[in-house]
Image: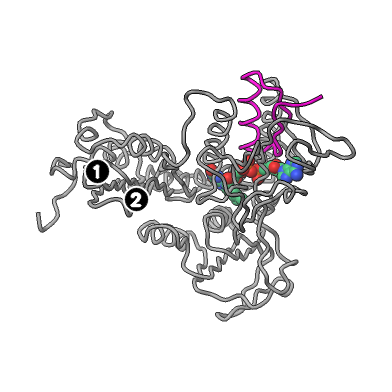
Amino acid sequence: MEYDVVVIGGGTAGYVAGSILARRNKRVLVIEKNKFGGVCVNSGCVPSIFLFDATFLLSRLNEIGNYLGIDVSAEITPSLFSKRNDIVEYLSDTGRKLVENSGAETIIGEAKIISRNEIKLDSKIIKFKKLVIATGTKAKIPNIEGIENAISEDEAVNLNCKPSSMIIVGGGYAGVEIAQFFSRLGTDVTLLSKSRLLRAFPDEARSAIKESLEFDGVNVVENVNIERIYGEKVYTNKGIFKGEIIVYATGRKPQLPEGIEKLNLNINSNGIVVDEYMNAGENVYAIGDVVDKERKTAHSAIFDAIISSLHILNDKITVRRNNFKIPQVIYTDPQVGIVGNIYEAKKFSTFPFNATTRSIINGLREGYVKIGINEENEVVFGEVIGNKAEELINILTIIVNSKMKVESLVLMPFVHPSLSEAIVNAAKGFFGLDVDNYKSENE
Ligand SMILES: Cc1cc2nc3c(=O)[nH]c(=O)nc-3n(C[C@H](O)[C@H](O)[C@H](O)COP(=O)(O)OP(=O)(O)OC[C@H]3O[C@@H](n4cnc5c(N)ncnc54)[C@H](O)[C@@H]3O)c2cc1C
C-alpha cells in the first residue's frame, strides 16, 4: 500500500495540509507522535490566549467597577484552569477529527525517515509519493547552570495553579504574555530579559508593553546576564531573584524527524530551507515552524500548508509565499499587531484611540493605528497598539497585501462608531482630513 502524501506532524500546519490534500482526493496519512493540534492548541496560542482573555476580563471588571460605579470582586478558583484544559482537549480532539472527516488517515506514533519514499513507524514501513514535514519546534533550553530547576514556556501556560511568585527568563513575546497574565492572576512576577524587551518590535510597541507590565506590577529587568539558577533563586549580574516557579521562554528550535539527513535537505539552525512553494527537495515539502523563516506563527503555518498543498495538487491558483506579508500579534494588554515592512514606508500617519469615539465610549483609549505608505502611495506597513489589535491588523493585512493606495483607503465608508475607523482616520491624516484628531502645533 502506497500513500500519495504522508504528512509528519499533526500540528497546525500538518492538520491543514493533510485535510486539504485528502479533500482533493489524495490518499493521505497524517502521523502525530503526541497530540493533534501541536504547540498552538496544546501549549501555545490556545492556553495562553485563554489566560489572556480571562485576565483581561478580570482587569476590565475592576476598571468597569470604578468607571460605572459598580462594586465588583472576583476570586480565582481552580475551575479557571480546568476550563482551559477542557478547551485544549476539545480543540486537540477536533483537529484529529477534522483531518479524518476530510478523508485522511491518522495515526499516533513517531515517524522516522528511511528514504525519500519511505518512513518507519515502530516496525512498520510506510511508502509514499510525496512527504510533507510539519514537525514544528520545541522550546530551546538555555545554557544556564541549574536550568533543570526551571520549566519551559509550554509548561508555564499549562500550569494548573497560580504560583505565589514566578521568574521568567526571556523577554520575547511568550515571556511578556506569560508575565502579564500571571501577574494579573496575582502572582508576583519578575521578567528577566538579556536585552531590551521585544527587541524586534518598534519602539512605541515595546514601551507601551513595558509600561503596561510595570503598571500590572511586573518587575521588568532588562539587559541582565543570568549566571546560574539554584533551587528557587536566579543569580544575575543585577542581583538575586527568587521565584516559586522559574520559567524559560528563550526561543525555540526546529524539531527534525529522525533520519532527515537521508533526504539531503538544506537545513540550518532556524529550520529547513524551502522555495516559494515550500518545496525542500525532490518530493519533499516542509511547512510551519520547522521551516527556516521569520515570524513563526500559527497563521503563517496555515498559509504554508495551503501553498504547499496547492503546489502538490498542481492547482492553477498556486501562489508564491514571498508575495504575501504575514501579520504578527502580541496578546498583551494593550495588544500589538504589525504587518508589512516598516523600512519600505516613506511617510507615516498615526491616529490615536483617544480620539476614536468607540474607544471613548468603552473606556479603552490607549494606543493608536499607524500606517506607512511608499512613494507610490501604497500602504506597505500597518501597526496597531490597543484593544482588538488582533482584529484591526487583519483589515490592515488585506490593505497591505492588496497594495491598496492610500487615496482609495481614505474614501472607505467605515462604520461609525467602530474601532476600525481609526484605520481610515489614519489614512485621512495624509490629506489633513482627520478632523477628529487635534491638529499639531506646527500645522
Ligand atoms: C507560548 C506560545 C504562545 C503562542 N501563541 C501564538 C499565538 O497567539 N498566535 C500564533 O499565531 N502563534 C502562536 N504561537 C506559535 C504557534 O504555536 C506555532 O507557530 C504553531 O504551533 C506552528 O505549527 P506547526 O504545525 O508548524 O508546529 P507544531 O504546532 O509544533 O506541530 C508540530 C507537530 O509535529 C509533531 N511531531 C514532531 N516530530 C514528529 C515525528 N517525528 N513524528 C510524528 N509527529 C511529530 C509534534 O508532536 C507536533 O504536534 C505560540 C507559541 C508558543 C510557544
Of 86 and 292, the residue lying toward us? 292
Instruction: Give, as a single range, the part of the protein colored magenta.
Output: 1-29
Q: Residue at x 42, y 57 (%)?
A: 201
Classify residue 401 by image quadrant.
top left
* Mark with earlier residue (2, 1): 2
Of 74 and 408, the residue lying toward us? 408
Q: Residue at x 56, y 54 (%)?
A: 174
SS under mark 2: loop
The picture places residue 382, in percent across and down from the top left corner, at 34, 45
The picture places residue 51, in percent across and down from the top left corner, at 58, 46
Residue 163 located left or right of residue 71? right
Three-letter code, disc 2: Glu
Kindly identify which numbered label has been placed on residue 366: 2
Residue 69 located left or right of residue 318? left
> Dot 1 surroundings within 10 Å: few (below 14), some, or many (20 or more)?
many
| Image-quarter location of ligand 1 | top right
Q: Residue furthest right?
A: 123
Q: Are marks 2 and 1 in contact (CB under 8 Å)?
A: no
Of 361 and 71, the residue lying toward us? 361
SS under mark 1: helix
Residue 189 located left or right of residue 255? left
The quadrant of the rendering that contains the C terminus is bottom left
Q: How many marks?
A: 2
CA gap, disc 2 to disc 1?
16 Å
Classify residue 183 by image quadrant.
bottom right
Three-letter code, disc 1: Ala
> Dot 2 surroundings within 10 Å: few (below 14), some, or many (20 or more)?
some
* Residue corresponding to mark 1: 426
Of 324 and 440, the residue lying toward us? 324
Is residue 337 something one can see in this rendering? yes
